[in-house]
Amino acid sequence: MQKPLMPKATAVWLVDNTTLTFDQIAEFCGLHTLEVQGIADGEVAANIVGLDPVANNQLTREEIERCEKDPSARLKLKQDEVSARKRPKGPRYTPVSKRQDRPDAIAWLLAKHPELSDAQISRLIGTTKQTISAIRDRTHWNMSNITPRDPVSLELCSQQDLDEVIREAARRLERQQAKARTAQEAEAAQVESPDASRADHSDQQVHAPEKT
């Protein structure tokens, strides 16, 4: 099931403003029940400002009330009712008002997900490989003012898109590791093979019958 934008902030709001159970909030936001309980106790996400999913057009007030009346019911995102449109390939268009936030998002992605390729980051938030390289090398003209921030919270991409590129990167890393292991095993077999041949040859010499 698709998760809401900024799950923890949404969970904070639901804990503070509804009578939903911890289980209902946890499942809707993709969190562990104990994590939601920690939010209610003030031990988790204490500095996170709640995000109203009704004002954000992700839930209806009627949907919340329906689940408040039935603890076994599960919240459904409004987007779930509409078939998700597949985003076209190519760089993402970023509104002018959001472009100044991209360096912060790049810094966050490089720090939190170094497995992502420059091409993936470029497609995800609509930036250039040159900008990514400059931030990685700390040669960006505005480096002193860049603060790593989550691109989802900056509304530069959706949580779904971010999760997908992370999964793609993980699959690519697994393939590379498997390929490296295969190469190492093949190299080890080649190293062992001459020794085995020499041992066999020595055996034959030791056991060869003496000529009379």
Image (cartoon, rainbow, N blue to C red):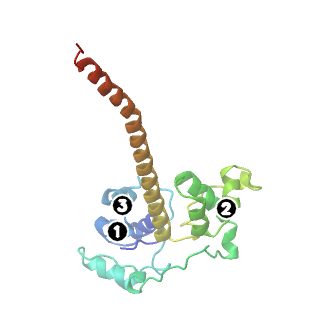
Mark positioned earlier in the residue sequence (1 or 2) = 1
Disc 1 crowd rating (10 Å Cα; few below 14, some 14-19, many 20+) is many
Q: Is residue 28 left or right of residue 8?
A: left
* 3D distance between C-alphas at marks 1 and 2: 39 Å
What's the residue at 59%, 63% (across, down)? 119
Report the front residue among 12 and 198. 198
Q: Are the two marked residues, 1 and 3, in contact with CB atoms closer than 8 angstroms?
A: yes
* Residue 167, quarter of the rendered image: bottom left
What's the residue at 65%, 64% (across, down)? 102
Extreme-right residue of the structure? 141
Task: Please name the residue that numbered disc 3 is placed on.
Answer: 36
Q: Is residue 86 left or right of residue 93?
A: left
Count numbered badges in the picture: 3
Under mark 1, the amino acid is Ile
Q: Quadrant of the N terminus?
A: bottom left
Q: Quadrant of the C terminus?
A: top left
Position of residue 182 measured from the top left corner of the image (x, y, whole percent):
40, 47
Task: Please name the residue that numbered disc 2 is placed on.
Answer: 129
Disc 3 crowd rating (10 Å Cα; few below 14, some 14-19, many 20+) is many
Can the viewer see residue 45 in this picture? no
In this picture, is 25 found above or below 117? below
Can the viewer see residue 122 in this picture? yes
Task: Please name the residue that numbered disc 1 is placed on.
Answer: 25
Under mark 2, the amino acid is Lys
Extreme-front residue of the structure? 212
**Element on which disc 2 rests:** helix
In this picture, is 88 found above or below 212? below
Position of residue 208 measured from the top left corner of the image (x, y, whole percent):
24, 20
* Residue 200, quarter of the rendered image: top left
